[in-house]
Image: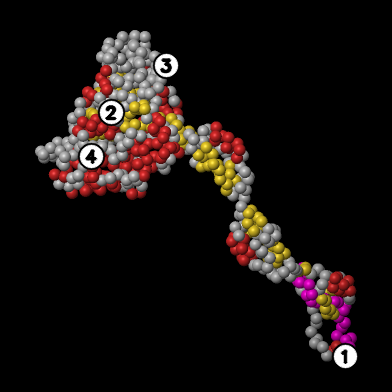
């Protein structure tokens, strides 16, 4: 086969990173072996495909994820050293490790001994401790993303990238290869750190037995089993494995996250305890009879590195553009990385539309046909394509999972495992108060089915939208149902009878009915003091729940202010008081200052408030008191004490 030279080979990105050769290819990026010219060291350069690099929202999210990853530093994580963009080339600079993937090594060996599997799981858990502590979850653990170095190093790669892709693109890949996907990702019920532990449990099972617990020609049936079945003990597939290994695998792969280890640290501690409890015979079960050398790594890469396919599995990428992918039947070794390049190439030498310079031959893509898969179990030169799309659609209908996955198409083979592409869309923003018909039209135009439910609401008019479920911005598979919650108006309740109750009793009655006490006013002369005499809303009438009812409370009988009648004519004063409802009594007294017949004083005093029928005593002047000698005999018998004719209150 004629060799085709990748157009980025020899390019120096940002005047520092020279692309040397292709290391791996995938649906999201190409990975190259390169040289950091400034530090004179080997590096790996991951370059995003043009169709993703041209999407600003994806690039922004990718850059943010890259920065998060770059802040992580752990011996079991592939280090991310730099992220940048040179022209139209968006790339990451990573640590370079001469290695093979865990998948390739596992395929080469068939299965691992418990000692080897434990060493891999322990390294991944150590890496996950750092990732989870930083507030991230990997969500794409699989043997393809674990690298085994020739020196025994074990490193986790590509954390965060799956999150970036699935958060920003409308055609989304089901997170994680279907053979390793956690139940909560299938059901879209949310992911956390325990999601990674489930996937690691599946990988642990595969390392111990040589196969995954769930396999099927139709990927969606595998996903269905992750949700509805329980992983069996590894010893059922490989009799003789230690019960400690069974317990660890079953614990990690519990369908419910709450039944799994609470953290990578907890699982790692249990793994260490199990290793200490096992004998050398149990640890090396299935391996050679020679005892393991404790000074050597439990596992080193033995597969041929030159045949390594890459960190990510091949996936057809339409419109390869600037960064071409290798054709389906080619390996990275077939790319001519040594051909002489005229002059010094830079990223700018690659044209914006992806067409290579005139002296470079065009790249010919051989995309996998829609609905066809390749089997990794067949020799490369004898592979044949098998149509599965019709069977996949039938499986979706039969399993009732169309609402979860949609009608998916086979998009390629990743390390022997098929990924599902699902068309996703964001729930549009619908303002509260929007008419139901208008909101329904918006959702249907966005590709969603619409269901409705009503709810009482005090502030939103009847027949208009309160909210959507799921909320705006949530990513759903196209065709999924979105519920429009519309207002049925405010909830109405019957107003209780409040008249005759005390204020406290009325307050409690209103609260029990779902209402509240409003303004409280008082009135005189109506009803018994301290009792409600009227309410703003009639008893048994319907009122909006939570609304207020005003009440009027009696302050007792009506009182009248006594007028100031001092100096007034008695007869006129008498008639006035009688007209106001008072009873009147007269007391004649001498007065040095008040003319005879005028009111000298009164009791109760002027301005005092009294109820009707109160007795008011008017002291009326008899004139000046005569001299004592001129007093009649009968008055001489009276007390000689001079009367005080000053007004009294």
Q: Gap between marks 1 and 3, in whole Å?
A: 140 Å
Q: CA distance from mark 2 to mark 1?
A: 147 Å
In this view, the residue farthest toward the left is 290
Report which quarter residue 386 is drawn in: top left
Indicate which label's residue lies in the foreground, 3 or 2: 2
Q: In the image, is residue 350 above or below residue 424?
A: above
Nearest to the observer: residue 339 or residue 75:
339
The residues tagged by marks 4 and 1 sit, at their Cα atoms, a distance apart of 141 Å
Q: CA distance from mark 2 to mark 4?
A: 19 Å
Residue 339 in the image, given as x and y percentages of width and height: 27, 12
> Measured from the top left, where is residue 276 in percent x and y?
18, 47
| Residue 571 shows in the view | yes
Give the magenta range: 606-634
Q: Earlier in the sequence, mark 2 or mark 4?
A: 4
Q: Which residue is mark 3?
A: 353
Q: Which residue is mark 1?
A: 633
Q: How busy is the neighbourhood of tag 1: few (under 14 within 10 Å), some, or many (20 plus)?
A: few
């Amino acid at each position: 086969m004629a060799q085709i030279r990748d157009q980025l080979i020899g390019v120096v990105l940002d005047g520092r990173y020279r692309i040397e050769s292709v290391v791996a290819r995938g649906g999201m990026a190409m990975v190259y072996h390169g040289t950091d010219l400034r530090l004179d060291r080997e590096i790996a350069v991951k370059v995003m495909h043009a169709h993703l690099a041209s999407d600003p929202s994806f690039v922004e999210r990718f850059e943010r994820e890259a920065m998060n990853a770059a802040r992580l530093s752990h011996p079991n994580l592939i280090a991310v050293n730099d992220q940048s963009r040179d022209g139209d080339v968006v790339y990451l600079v990573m640590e370079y490790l001469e290695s093979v993937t865990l998948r390739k090594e596992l395929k080469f060996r068939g299965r691992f001994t418990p000692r080897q599997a434990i060493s891999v799981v322990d390294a991944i858990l150590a890496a996950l401790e750092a990732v989870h502590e930083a507030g991230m979850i990997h969500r794409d653990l699989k043997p393809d993303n674990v690298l085994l170095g020739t020196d025994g190093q074990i490193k986790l790669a590509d954390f965060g990238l799956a999150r970036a892709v699935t958060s920003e693109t409308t055609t989304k890949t089901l997170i994680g290869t279907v053979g390793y996907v956690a139940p909560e990702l299938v059901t879209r019920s949310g992911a956390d750190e325990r999601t990674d532990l489930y996937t690691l449990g599946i990988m642990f099972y595969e390392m111990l037995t040589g196969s995954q617990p769930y396999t099927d020609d139709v990927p969606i049936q595998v996903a269905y089993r992750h949700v509805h079945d329980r992983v069996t003990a590894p010893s059922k597939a490989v009799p003789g494995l230690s019960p400690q290994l069974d317990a660890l695998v079953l614990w990690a792969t519990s369908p419910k996250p709450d039944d799994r280890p609470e953290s990578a640290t907890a699982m790692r501690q249990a793994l260490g305890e199990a290793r200490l409890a096992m004998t050398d015979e149990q640890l090396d079960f299935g391996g050679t009879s020679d005892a393991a050398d404790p000074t050597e790594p439990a596992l080193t890469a033995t597969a041929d590195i030159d045949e390594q396919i890459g960190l990510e599995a091949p996936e057809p990428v339409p419109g390869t553009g600037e960064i071409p992918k290798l054709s389906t039947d080619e390996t990275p070794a077939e790319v001519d990385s040594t051909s002489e390049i005229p002059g010094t190439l830079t990223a700018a030498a690659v044209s914006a539309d992806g067409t290579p310079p005139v002296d470079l031959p065009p790249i010919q893509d051989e995309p996998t046909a829609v609905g066809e898969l390749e089997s990794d179990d067949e020799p490369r030169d004898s592979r044949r394509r098998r149509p599965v799309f019709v069977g996949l659609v039938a499986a979706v209908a039969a399993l009732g999972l169309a609402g979860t996955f949609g009608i998916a198409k086979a998009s390629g083979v990743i390390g022997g495992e098929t990924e599902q592409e699902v068309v996703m869309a964001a729930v549009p923003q619908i303002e509260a108060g929007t008419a139901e018909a208008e909101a329904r039209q918006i959702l249907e135009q966005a590709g969603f089915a619409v269901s409705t439910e009503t709810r009482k609401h005090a502030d939103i008019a009847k027949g208009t939208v309160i909210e959507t479920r799921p909320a705006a911005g949530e990513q759903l598979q196209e065709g999924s149902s979105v519920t429009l919650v519309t207002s049925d108006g405010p909830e109405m309740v019957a107003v209780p009878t409040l008249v005759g109750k005390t204020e406290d009793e009325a307050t409690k009655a209103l609260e029990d009915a779902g209402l509240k006490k409003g303004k409280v006013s008082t009135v005189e002369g109506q009803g018994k003091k301290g009792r409600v005499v009227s309410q703003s809303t009639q008893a048994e009438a319907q009122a909006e729940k939570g609304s207020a009812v005003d009440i009027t409370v009696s302050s007792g009988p009506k009182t009248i202010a006594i007028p100031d009648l001092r100096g007034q004519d008695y007869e006129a004063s008498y008639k006035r008081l009688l007209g106001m409802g008072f009873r009147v009594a007269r007391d004649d007294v001498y007065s040095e200052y008040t003319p005879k017949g005028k009111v000298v004083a009164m009791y109760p005093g002027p301005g005092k408030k009294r109820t009707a029928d109160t007795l008011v005593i008017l002291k009326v002047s008899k004139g000046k008191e005569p001299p004592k000698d001129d007093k009649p005999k009968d008055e001489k018998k009276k007390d000689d004490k001079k009367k005080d004719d000053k007004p009294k209150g």
